[in-house]
Amino acid sequence: MPTKLTINGETRELDVPDDMPLLWALRGELGMVGTKFGCGVGLCGACTVHVDGVATRSCSTPVSSLAGKQVSTIESLAESPVGRALQQAWLDADVMQCGYCQAGQLMNATALLAKNPSPASDEITSAMAGNICRCACYKRIHAAIAEVAA
Ligand code: FES
């Protein structure tokens, strides 16, 4: 039976196997390739989306668990004021190198600031600790978040 959920404000029905992770459905079924595959086992954060506003690893979240939920992906980031502010801060701080992990970084940062608009430095570090960046852009990521949080 298809799973009915909302993705970026649009109601979708996904007729996929119950155990298919959301990441596979987003990229393979819906062609939404902004969300990235990194490790596939919940360890790197590249696949982070929001489920009902909470940062969630889409590689480890079966579509069948999302019935009636609101999913937001990087494609809708600019629709939120915090998301737009973070995108600009990312550009101002020249955060990216290869860019591959940045969708997940931005989605996690947006969820952090939505929950805690003024995180202390150690709270930013702690909240972002699970998002791996192979180019090691951590200082610039932290600075961009702190800029928006200030
Ligand atoms: Fe999902 Fe790495 S791809 S956490």
Image (cartoon, helix red, strand yellow):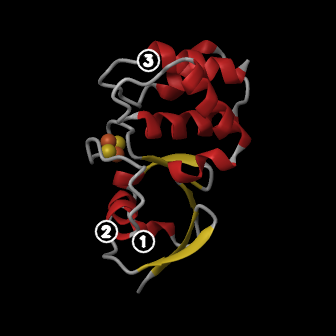
Identify residue type, mark 1: Ser
Quarter of image, res 149: top right
Could you tell me which secondary element the residue under label 1 belongs to? Answer: helix
Whether the residues at callouts 1 and 3 have beta carbons within 8 Å, the answer is no
Q: Which of the two marks, 3 or 2, is nearer to us in this view?
A: 3
Q: Quadrant of the N terminus?
A: bottom left
Q: How many marks?
A: 3
Quarter of image, res 48: top left
Q: Quadrant of the C terminus?
A: top right
Mark number displayed over residue 19: 2
- Residue 43 position within the rendered picture, expressed as x and y whole percent measured from the top left: 32, 38
The mark nearer the N terminus, 1 or 2, is 2
Q: Quadrant of ligand 1?
A: top left
How far apart are the alpha carbons under marks 3 and 2?
33 Å
Can residue 23 be seen here? The reply is: yes
Q: Residue at x 67, y 50 (%)?
A: 79
Q: Residue at x 64, y 65 (%)?
A: 9
- Residue 102 position within the rendered picture, expressed as x and y whole percent measured from the top left: 44, 34
- Residue 83 position within the rendered picture, expressed as x and y whole percent measured from the top left: 64, 39
Q: Residue at x 35, y 18 (%)?
A: 136
Could you tell me which secondary element the residue under label 3 belongs to? Answer: helix
Whether the residues at callouts 1 and 2 have beta carbons within 8 Å, the answer is yes
Identify residue type, mark 2: Asp
Mark number displayed over residue 64: 1
Quarter of image, res 46: top left
**Location of mark 3 (residue):** 138
